[in-house]
Structures are given as structure tokens and as C-alpha cells.
Image (cartoon, rainbow, N blue to C red):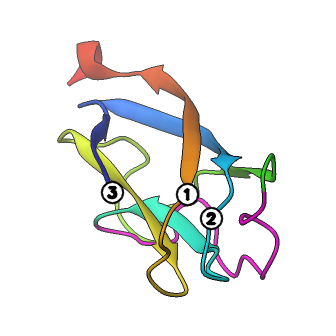
Amino acid sequence: TATSFIPLGAVPLAISVKVTTAITSNKYITSIGTTADADAFCSGLANDKLEGLNTEVSCPYVPAVGTSFLLVDTAVRLTLNGTPAGGVVRISMTYIDGASIL
């Protein structure tokens, strides 16, 4: 979980995740979301989709409930099919800064 990755008032549009060091132990990312909505960006990611070096996905923000903007700093949650021994990802997000309208 990347703590406070999404700032207060942000209106997320999409997120991209790229594996920069392969995820080990035959584990892989199955969904990408927030602490409140585990698959707000991506769900149902299959084996090999986000596991090997340089694999990458980009997904739109589709919250299950609530508003499209976030009222508190929010963490990004990466869910895996188990606990890997290693691996590194790079996360980037496109969003509208809506803090000024709150």
C-alpha cells in the first residue's frame, strides 16, 4: 500500500503500474485500488499481466460507491495472489486537482 498517494480533493482519472523488478515466488498483482475500494482501478488481473519485468497496465478510475473526488488523502492498494519474496513497481496517476473546490 502506498500511503497517501492520492491527495485530498483529487479526482482520479487513471493509474498506470509498471513492474521494474520482477515480482517473485510466482506471485502477481490481481487488482489495483484504494484502501476503501480494492479494485477501484483494475480488477481480475491474470497471471503474467503484472508480474514480469516491464509488464505494465493502465486502468481508469471507476469507484464502486461515493463521489469521484476524494475527501481525504488516500492510499493506493495493490492486491497480490500471495506474498512474494521480492519485486518493485512504479505507480503513476493522472488526476484533476480538485482541492480548491472543497
Dot 3 or dot 2, earlier in sequence: 3
The residues colored magenta run 36-52
- Reading the image, the residue beneath label 1 is 87
Q: In which quarter of the image is the C terminus?
A: top left
Tag count: 3
Q: Which dot, 3 or 2, sits closer to the camera?
A: 2
How would you rate the neighbour count of disc 2 (Cα within 10 Å): few for under 14, some for 14-19, many for 20 or more? many
* Relative to 2, 14 lies left or right: right
- Reading the image, the residue beneath label 3 is 1
- The residue sitting at the bottom extreme is 82
Q: Which residue is drawn at 29% across and 30% down?
A: 7
The residue type indicated by label 1 comes to: Gly
Magenta-span inclusion, residue 19: no
- Reading the image, the residue beneath label 2 is 23
Query: Depth check: 38 or 17 in front?
Result: 17
Q: Do the CB atoms of the residues marked 3 and 1 lie less than 8 Å apart?
A: no
